[in-house]
Amino acid sequence: MERHPYDCYFDLLTPVLNSKCEELELLDYGKVSNQMLWSYLTRKKWKKAQDNPCFSALVNEVLAVKPGDFMNFQTVDAFRSPNWFTEVEEGDLNALLYGERKI
């Protein structure tokens, strides 16, 4: 995977990311990691990176993440997985589809 231009700010933004992750957990959105939030920011919010971003603007953008936007991104990202049935055996799939398992 290609490095994002803002990856050099990850360590500096860690306290802000922690704060936002805690906020999402308090709002009952489940366990959110810094990496999940960083992935959303770099792949969605910061798709077009500026050359020299102002650090305070990055902090503001992290704190301004809306829970709904983040969860929509996570949902779409989960649907983009390569193949849901790669680890499912044919017998298990038949049991799911037809209610019977062939051994």
Image (tube, grey):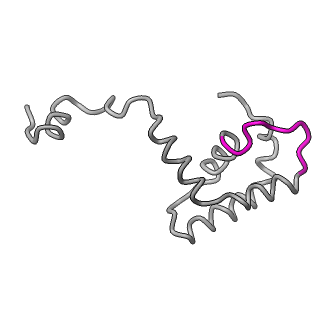
Looking at the picture, how far across and down is residue 23, in whole percent? Answer: 63, 68
The magenta stretch spans residue 51: yes
Q: Name the one closer to the observer, 71 or 15.
A: 71
Q: Main secondary structure of the magenta part?
A: loop
Magenta range is: 44-54
Identify the image quadrant of residue 95: top left
Identify the image quadrant of residue 42: top right
The magenta stretch spans residue 7: no
Q: Which residue is drawn at the image coordinates 53% and 47% (left, top)?
A: 74
Q: Which residue is drawn at the image coordinates 48% and 47% (left, top)?
A: 75
The number of callouts visible is 0
Q: Which residue is drawn at the image coordinates 10% and 42% (left, top)?
A: 99
Q: Is residue 86 above or below residue 70?
A: above
Q: Which residue is drawn at the image coordinates 9% and 37% (left, top)?
A: 101
Is 75 displayed left or right of 34 in the figure?
Answer: left
Identify the image quadrant of residue 51: top right
